[in-house]
Image (cartoon, coloured by chain):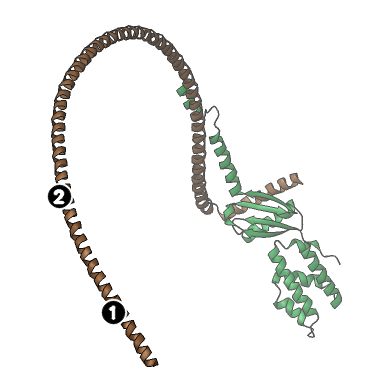
Amino acid sequence: MLIIVTVAILAITCAVVTVAYSRSLLCQRRLQRENEALRSNIHAKAGALLEEAHRHSLSIIEDANQHAQDMLASTQAYVDHSNEALSGRLKDLTDKQKKQIAERADSLTVMYQNLLENLQKEHINTFRNVSKDIEIDGKEELNAFARAVEEETALSQKELAARVDAAYKKAEQEIAEYKKSELREFDKQVEEAVAKAAEKILGKSLSLSDQEELVVRALEEAHTRLMKSH
Amino acid sequence: MDVPKQILQLIPTTQERSELLAEIDLLTKSLFQEDEDSFKNVLRNDIGKDSAGILSHLLEKEESLKQREAFLTSLKEALLALPLLHLTVAVKPSEAGLELLAKKSRSLFAPTVILDIVVDENIFGGALVSYGGRYADCSLATKMDDYFAKIKNQKSHPKGDQPLAEKIKNTVQN
């Protein structure tokens, strides 16, 4: 029974499921058809829109080109007009500048002429004064130089006299030294010569009796001297 | 004991005195020899003839050994006490010259003076004399030096001579 019931329930459930499935399939097919219809509709609308947009763009571009041409035309005209105006203006300015420069040049010329004249006058005066100053200074310098020369001359004479004195003293000393040196050398030579001569002459010429006689005299002389000193 | 001055005056120089002193020593030694003839032998053989003659003559009076010894000792002391005269000469004197110098020295300085002679030819002549601690240069070399020094001084400072530097100075200034 239970099995029957169960089978029955299962049969019922299957039937229900089958029905639900059938309905779902139907619903799916209907939705698919609607979707396709919608897609085609959207395609058609999109193409129309694109076409419309294309036409609109073309018209805009044409308008823009037209406007640009118009602007270019107007700009050229303006440029032409501006050039003409600028040329005229420049010409006016040039003329005006020329005139001003000429006037300025004239005034500068006059001013420089006056300035040069004044400078010339001043220089002339300056040169005159300088000449006078040079003359005065020159005289003073000449006088100072003359005084300095006189002083230097006097000083030089004194220095010269002092140098001459010093030279004389030095010469005196040198001559005295030389004289002493020469005398010493001379004396030395004389002494040597005399000693040699005396040695030769006395040693040979004095006989033994002469020598003994000299010794006797020496004894007498020594006695006299020693007695005096005693 | 007194020593006769005659014997002392017979000695002219220190050389003779030294010789005599040596002879006295020999005689003194011979007095004490065992040989009795020793004294006579020394007098005969070892003593100079002159000295021997004088000494034998003098010793004749002294007969005993002690008297002879005393005499010799006194003689020796007297010889050593003789005054000296140092003499430097240029040439060694002859015997006659030596006697002459001794005689002259005794007459001038003292009767018993003896000469101490040194030879130095550099003095040329004359003598250097030293007696009783005093000295006198009487040499010919010194006299020559003095003479040339005098001449040199006369040349160095002639009268009225103007120094050469002074002459130059005066010439330039004028």
Provide the residue designation for mark 1: A18
Q: Quadrant of residue A76?
A: top left
**Residue B24: percent from the left, percent from the top?**
76, 72
- Residue extending farthest to the front is A1
Q: Which mark is residue A34?
A: none
Provide the residue designation for mark 2: A51
Amino acid at the residue labelled 2 = Glu
Asked whether residue A90 is in view, the answer is yes
Helix, strand or loop at mark 2: helix
Most foreground residue, A38 or B36: A38
**Residue A94: percent from the left, percent from the top?**
19, 17
- Residue at 82% over, 68% down: B74
Most foreground residue, B45 or A44: A44
**Residue A100: percent from the left, percent from the top?**
24, 13
Name the subunit of mark 2. A
Q: Colour of chain B?
A: green
Name the subunit of mark 1. A
Residue A113 left/right relative to A208: left
Amino acid at the residue labelled 1 = Thr
- Residue at 27% over, 11% down: A108
Question: Closer to the camera: disc 1 or disc 2?
Answer: 1
Other residues around mark 1 within 10 Å, as few (<14) / some (14–19) / many (≥20): few
Q: CA distance from mark 1 to mark 2?
A: 49 Å
Other residues around mark 2 within 10 Å, as few (<14) / some (14–19) / many (≥20): few
Q: Quadrant of residue A1?
A: bottom left
Most foreground residue, A22 or A72: A22
Helix, strand or loop at mark 1: helix
Most foreground residue, A207 or A125: A125
Q: Colour of chain A?
A: brown
Asked whether residue B100 is in view, the answer is no
